[in-house]
Amino acid sequence: MKVERTKLDGVLVLQPTIYKDERGFFLESFNKDKYVKAGINFDFVQDNHSRSSKGVLRGLHFQVNKPQGKLVSCTSGEVLDVVVDINPDSETFCEYISVELSGENSKQLWVPPGYAHGFYVLSEFADFCYKCTSYYDPEDNSGIIWNDPKIDINWPTNNPILSDKDKNNLLIKDMFN
């Protein structure tokens, strides 16, 4: 497994070793020892799987009091995955990284607790999977609006398909002073 560090502290891009032949492929999607060696030493308590259509943007989500670490991957289709630093005391506050994740490249992204996360579907549909370090709590869930000008994410669209909840996410300046 190759591990790439990003400009955001603790956020990692992971490339599992893929064994391909005429029958198909094999990869380890998770091996606790290898992930601990890479610096991901968390217990995962919940696995999630979503399917979304082209043009859907989900995010930018985070939990306030019970932050979730997420090991994310796209098992079919392709997404632009985005992580935003929401720690006002961080040197990279309001900065983001984006990575294309797909069923083809099998990359994973480690999003440590305390970051906002979202993705945009580039293909006709995408299956998105993530392992979480804490349980989803709808009462603790929050979000930043996808087009916040302070963060200025370079999304490949100006008109994404959003849930009603995500349409009402707040600007980061109204959440963190």
Image (tube, rainbow, N blue to C red):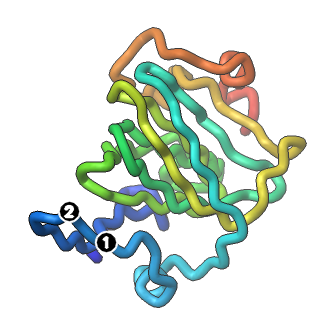
Q: Amino acid at mark 1?
A: Leu
Q: Which residue is mark 1?
A: 27
Report the quarter where the N terminus lies: bottom left
Q: Is residue 11 left or right of residue 4?
A: right
Asked if residue 95 is positioned above or below residue 46 in the image, the reply reads: above
Q: Which mark is residue 65?
A: none
**Residue 12 appears in which quarter of the rendering?**
bottom left
- Residue 72 in the image: x percent, y percent? 49, 55
Mark 2 vs mark 1, CA separation in Å = 11 Å
- Label 1 SS: strand
Task: Report the front residue among 158 and 96.
Answer: 158
User: Do labels 2 and 1 touch, CB within 8 Å?
Assistant: no
Q: Amino acid at mark 2?
A: Gly
Taking the spot 51% from the left edge, 30% from the top edge, the residue there is 52
Q: Which residue is mark 2?
A: 24
- Label 2 SS: strand
Taking the spot 52% from the left edge, 20% from the top edge, the residue there is 147
Report the quarter where the C terminus lies: top right
Asked if residue 176 is positioned above or below residue 42 in the image, the reply reads: above
- Residue 110 in the image: x percent, y percent? 48, 62
Question: As drawn, which residue projects farthest toward the front?
Answer: 23
Q: Is residue 3 left or right of residue 139?
A: left
